[in-house]
Amino acid sequence: MNPLVELNLSLILFLPWFVILGVLYWLFPQQPRHRARMLFDVAALGLSLAAFLLSIYWSHASADPVYGAMWQQVLATALGYSVFLAVLTLAFLVRRHWLSRRG
């Protein structure tokens, strides 16, 4: 397998699901939708993706190759997805708290 594809396989496989989650995060709640919220949402989605990428690259480098190349993929997928969801969930909670205080 191409090393670049192997390193980014988790991203390739999860990208459609991340797009769905990102669209749902962006659309709900529908109001209020002001400039500050849009900037916050863009930053949250970008941070979630960056955290995902950092976690899969770290897990590829840290996984013990004694257990085989598949273990690197399994660890990268599990850790990356968890990190993406954790960052997005935290952003959702912070945004909800922030919007309720403004509101």
Image: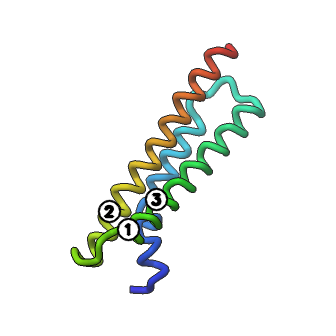
Residue at 59 percent across and 49 percent down: it is 47
Write down the residue under mark 3: 55
Kind of residue indicated by mark 2:
Leu
Q: Report, in whole angstroms, how far the alpha carbon at label 2 lies from the one at label 1.
A: 9 Å
Whichever of callouts 1 and 3 sits on the residue coming sooner in the sequence is 3
Residue at 44 percent across and 53 percent down: it is 17
Mark 3 Cα shell of 10 Å, populated few (<14), some (14-19), many (≥20): many
Q: x, y percentage for residue 32?
A: 68, 23
Instruction: Find numbered disc 1 in the image and state the secondary structure of the residue it sits on.
Output: helix
Residue at 38 percent across and 86 percent down: it is 1
Q: In front: mark 1 or mark 3?
A: 1
**Above/below status of 67 relative to 30:** below
27 and 65: which is toward the camera? 65
19 and 41: which is toward the camera? 41
Q: Report, in whole angstroms, how far the alpha carbon at label 1 lies from the one at label 3.
A: 10 Å
Write down the residue under mark 2: 75
